[in-house]
Amino acid sequence: MNVLGYRLTLTALIGWLIILVCVGSAVLAPWIAPHDPNAPLGQRWEAPSAEHWFGLDQIGRDMFSRMLYGGRISITLAFLATCLAFAVGVVAGFAAALLGRWVDVALSRIADVILSMPILMSALIVISAVGSSAAVLILTIGLLYAVIVFRVARAVAMNIVVLEYVEAARLRGEGLFWVILREILPNALPPLAAEFGLRFSFAFLFVASLSFLGLGVQPPDADWGSMVKESALAIPAGLAAPLYPAAAIALLTIGVNMVVDWLLSLHSRPHGDNA
Amino acid sequence: MLKLLVQRLALGVATLLAVSVLIFWVTELLPGDLASNILGQSATPENIAAIRAELGLDRPAVERYTEWLGDAVQGDLGKSLANKRPVIDVIGPRLVNTLFLAIYAAVIAVPLSVLLGILAAIYRNSVFDKGVNIASLAAISMPEFFIGYFLILFMSVQLKWFPAIATIKPEQGFFQHLYVTFLPMLTLILVVIAHMMRMTRTSVLSVMSSPYVEMAVLKGIPKGRIVVHHALPNALAPIINVIAINLAYLIVGVVVVEAVFTFNGLGRLMVDAVAKRDIPVVQACGLIFAIVFIGLNLIADVLSILSNPRLRHPR
Amino acid sequence: MNQWDELQQAARSGRVSRREFMRRAAALGVATSLASGVLAKAGYAQTPVKGGTLRVGIAGGSTTDSLDITTYTDTVMINVSTSIWDGLVEVDDKNQIQPELLETLEPNADATEWVCNVRKGVTFSNGKTLDADDIVYSLNLHRGEGSKSGAAGPMKPIKDVVKMSGNQVKIVLEAPDADLPYVLSDYHVLVVPNGFTDWANPVGTGGYKLEAFEPGVRAVLSNRGGYWKEGRCNLDAVEFSVINDDAARMQALMAGEVDVSHRVVVSLIDQINAAGSYEIVQAAAGYHFNLPMLVDKAPYTNNDVRLALKYAINRQKVVELMFGKYARVGNDHPIPESDPFHNNELPQREYDPEKAAFHARKAGLGVSDVILSASDAAFNGAIDMSVLFQATAAAAGINVTVRREPGDGFWDNVWLKAPFMTSYWGGRPAATQMLATAYQSTAPWNDTHWNDAGFDKLLADAKATTDQAKRKTYIWEMQRMLHEEGGAIIPLFKDWLDVHDSKVKGHTPHGMFDLCNGRIAQKAWIEA
Amino acid sequence: MAESATKTQLLDVRNLRIEAVAESGARVTLVDDVSFTLNPGEVLGLIGESGAGKSTIGLSTLVYARSGCQITGGQIVFRGHELRELGIEARQSLRGAKVAYIAQSAAAAFNPAHTLYDQVCEVALQHGVMNASQARVEAVRLFRELDLPNPETFGNRYPHQVSGGQLQRAMAAMAMIAKPDLLVFDEPTTALDVTTQVEVLASFKKLIRDHGTAALYITHDLAVVAQVADRIMVLRHGKMVEEGAATQILQQPRMDYTRMLVAERVAAQASTFVAPHGSSAQPILATRDVVASYRSGPRVIDNVSIELMRGDTLAVVGESGSGKSTLARVIVGLLPRQEGDVLFNGESLPPRLESRSKEQHRRIQMIYQMPDVALNPRQTLLDIIGRPIAFYFNKSRREVRARVEELMRQIDLPLDYISRRPGELSGGQKQRVCIARALAAEPDVIICDEVTSALDPLVADEILRLLRRIQDQTGVGYLFITHDLGTVRRIANKVAVMYKGQMVAYGATQQVFNPPYHPYTELLLSSVPEIRSDWLDEVLRKRRKVVR
């Protein structure tokens, strides 16, 4: 079986399936969710039943429905943040690689400085300064990750810029954007795709952590991270409730990482002794 | 080469300065003019002005920055706005705890992960390799609180093997500390080992695809020796870097783990301080984190320079 | 659950006295030996054993904590302080005033002047003997201009404190107050040596001395021996570990890392009981959750808005869903049923979407007007409760935005500042005291900015009179005012829920506040 | 007979078949039914273009196949043992000890992390042939034998501290130290400059002769193999074309393919030169005392002045590091000149690329050495060739397509390739596309930077023909950067010889390439291997004379 014209390994296949399921259920949440995610429907922490597949949460809301909606929020947040990061980071990175000289130096130094503050700390300060909301989360994470993406994009572009077809384009007198969009981008896509997956999974965990620290989206909405936090009290009670969302987080991340591994493996094929 | 090292050092210091400016500036963005925050209800224009003067907020930022930095360099980080204690006293014990946990985890994680990585590289595509690979993948993908709560649920609440609360008490002995902080340590190494091991493996493998390794094969060198003697020395730089990154994480990035195990580390202190708008503490934490970050990267840089024969033995 | 079980439960939660228990046990035909066994388990056993270290997992601590007694706001410092210092009087678990460092308090006819005899033969940890000067100095800590004391409010009415002799002082009030002893039982009011200022190195008459203190982390105390109170302070050492996180605190208990804890998470009680080796200590009284609205901040200036919101919350559902049998529905005033002055003729306010909608419409309440600042730092489940409120309010067409506030710094940054928030009150021994602390226009902790001359007048009168009938009418009237116009939604009264390992004795229920009204270190002892 | 055979024969390869398994799972045959034998002390030359399977065969004698490849058929009998049956340990004890390999690029094949001693002696030590001290002695001996500078200390250096030629010889030492019975030379001199190649070649020859070691000598250069091989085997597309004694193959080749190879090589030595065209007064492109350097480094080119006439071909020759490519970069403006001037049609061009006009860009085009990195793998030929047309002459899509097809006819590419991507083309075809792209701009000058050196001789030959045809048709001028004098002879009517950044000789080709020579030119010319098997010895004799 092939995807993007490459042969699919088993793990990659599993990865893709996981992503498909998670994203699919997130997108379809409003239609497939059996219950209103915010309406108390019964007793606290009712055990799973035919009616409530994952049981009810600490105030009697349907866990399964909340999971679906929660996934919606988590995935959307992480995805948008990652997109933002790439929109900013890739352009800046390519520009730095292509223009070189002071542009490169300036941008790189700025990146160094920003990245010498732990990202979590920067995010905490900004978010608790501005007050946490979906938009703030996306902007903060997106811009912080943009710096990392910048570095990666720059590195990737550096390897392409030296190639002669880029030089040829410049000799022809092509403009900066044509060179970026037509000459560099198409050839930078595979490595960037892998990086995108990686960034997404990190953004995803990052959102979860922030929510866990109480800086997530505002109630009654809950992403998976804040769902864990909300139901954390069930852990000492020996109940599985908080582990559903946590497991969901882990699952999707594993899926993404599997695909990322596969994407990366496509670019490095080490020598071997196959005689 | 010496020149190169000096350059790196200078660069590090420069970055640190820039970061300190950034920290100073960003923390001042924290909302709720802290004067009115201190005064709360009884905030009237007059005594807000008074407090601002007392805190020196009326003076130009540049002046206050230079003063702050000057004091910081001499080890005076100011007084906590929240409880008027010197920031040093507030941070000191927390920093010690954090370092303790970090070192504890690192001492176990670093050798282990490098070893695993090399083994995985040697037995590439073997069952072992695949197993380790999947396991590490999973470990990376698990949110820390997931691992943490799991460990608590089983090893603490059910089996009662280890305490769920990792509170270090001075009167406890060293081994007592090790015991108390076992679960957070375990949580941390699960995360970092995965990262470092994977990086070790990939960078060794990438070197394995180089012509001189092929040459070694054609010289009839056994696989083990090839990996250790031919591949590893050339794969050091990336490995050193990922180790540095993870060490940094162990010191500055463990807020969640601290929260799960109510471990009194720097991370939680900073979160509290941010919430309380206790700006001097936030700035101090930020500064410390930045120093750790930049310092470790610097060391990594230097080491990978030293590990490069081209630079060690110039023409 | 049969009568015997019920009785045991009652005994454990201290709802019956020892004699009462034995009588009813006998009536049920239970062998005396067995019955007293149960009593022993319930901590009624008489002779305390000396020794042992008590490990307390305690919430309500912060890195901003300081030993200065005037600054206390929460459990940790209250419990630490009562083990270092003693108060003037103590409220017992029957809500009666017991002498402490003041042996007697004698009011004059109109209760404006109180003559108090200082207990003799009590010495401070620095060797100094307690005398009237110490009392005067200690009281003055909370009085006078610019006193930042948390007790400054309740102490305002004290006009003067006069030393009459080496061990006699007179307290002069601006206005009559028959409940002064209750006022003096305020947990801020502790006795330090005359002129004492060095809070870092506390000196007190208490049974313990401070060994280690890390604000927001831990406090360690050791018995300094020869405590003057009979049968109190039996432990060699007490160790308070601050664990604000509910889950963590319960884990610590279940993992056997602490012997005593409090603010038990209701949802974990079954779990804890199932474990077998723990006992829940349940005490019902004035502890209540409230949602204060600042009546001087729009839109809450409009009583229709307040009423709309009061009708929009489904108290019944909140109680049953979140706290089961450990809470009782509230009626938007702070006086519990257990209080003799509880106004039981007020109609219970029910969840009524129509009324709510009506008032909201009347007030022209906008979609984004109501923002509820919630944090579990207020009480565990505050956010969940807010969300439930949000749901039921939505059914009445009222849009409530819940804003999650960070737990740390909640009391510093949100309380008394946010126009609408989640909060709680620990309850007070005397109704007048409760009303004075939270609703008197001049009270620093007036968390609804409730400002009503009529109300203040009634309060003054209630304090002044010793005529119980009169008092009742005044206090009932104040409850009505709050019920109908007050700024606070008071959805429920919550039982104090402590827990301890069965080997811990003397940790008995107290309606006032959890952990034996903050005297856990004095009362608890460990079974040999 | 196998018995008797194995007694005399060192290596007996029968019906060897090696296949590559692609990502898609498809199998490609790299080596198809190849058989040959090798006697002790005998040297067999493997000749063929890229993709002929030379290296694959060479590696197979160490029972090694690069990843994705598999030996799927035939036997490799070495001293009577079927190597394919050996276990992993047996293979290890074979490699380096009995059969040793010498790779094309020593720079890449030496581990940067260890000294030469470590790596040379490692073989002997790992195979337990000798102990550390013996190994050192032996290494020094070999270094001396391979006339490496101060052999005693040579081994203490790290690979990056010695020159390419020395490294190549060091590798020979590494191969010889365990006294193997068979050496596999895999294009060992291809990466070297001609002048270095001579010495390295010489020392290799001496080594093989003195030790009487059998060898497989793999190369694409008939002239090189002529110097060392007793027998030659010609390969093409993984199949054997013909095999025979060196003299026979070189003098009377039987097969057409072999003939073509030989003919091409001979042509490269032809001494008939292209005459300069009628030199019109105005040079289309000229440099005046141009000086340039990278950043504040030393001068990479120093006072270079050349003139290119319309329709002429000016070749700039030199070894690596002579600054010839830098000259090209300065002319097009990629590297701003520091001093001097670059004139196009009499008017000075701005030093910086950015500050030149679209028209100035258009009229000077460039063709590169590596066609596969010169073409964007993600674009179709239509995009690639069509872009300059659209860009410079903003034509409609239909016009562009028409013009592209016209150009493709001109470079003899089938029109149905128009929607293909570079990946689907052969090296030669790619280079044609590059030419077409350059032509599309209808330039006055095309700068050809080593355009043929990455190509196989025959393909290169076709490209040169094509270039000349185009020149006749369009009168475009070529600035031809190359290190290969054969190419110069065939295409250039003017030549500039560069050495260490300076122009040591300049003029019409026949003047420069005929006595009286500039000494460096002479060295250069004499270093070009000739197909006569006695050429090498002759050259060396001459040089010794010079030394005396």
Image (spheres, coloured by chain):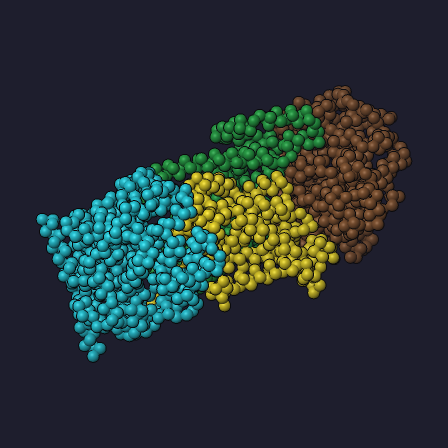
Chain colours: A yellow, B green, C brown, D cyan
Asked if one can make out residue B158 in the rendered structure from this viewpoint, the answer is: no
- Name the foreground residue: D95 vs C377: D95
- Name the foreground residue: D48 vs C231: D48
Asked if one can make out residue B36 in the rendered structure from this viewpoint, the answer is: yes
For the point 53% across and 28% down, the residue is B62
For the point 14% across and 56% down, the residue is D539
The quarter of the rendered structure image containing the N terminus of chain C is bottom right
- Name the foreground residue: A216 vs C339: A216
Point out residue B173 in the picture as x, y percentages from the top left corner.
Answer: 51, 42
Left or right: residue B168 versus residue D455 is right
- Name the foreground residue: C192 vs B275: B275
Point out residue B189 in the picture as x, y percentages from the top left corner.
Answer: 49, 50
For the point 37% across and 70% down, the residue is D28
Q: Which residue is situated farthest in the bottom direction here?
A: D1
Q: Which residue is situated farthest in the right direction here?
A: C469
Left or right: residue A272 versus residue D527 is right
Left or right: residue C320 versus residue A16 is right
In the image, residue C427 above or below residue D34: above
Point out residue D347 in the picture as x, y percentages from the top left corner.
Answer: 34, 42
Point out residue D104 in the picture as x, y percentages from the top left corner.
Answer: 27, 58
Question: Would you identify the image quadrant in which residue A105 lies?
Answer: top left
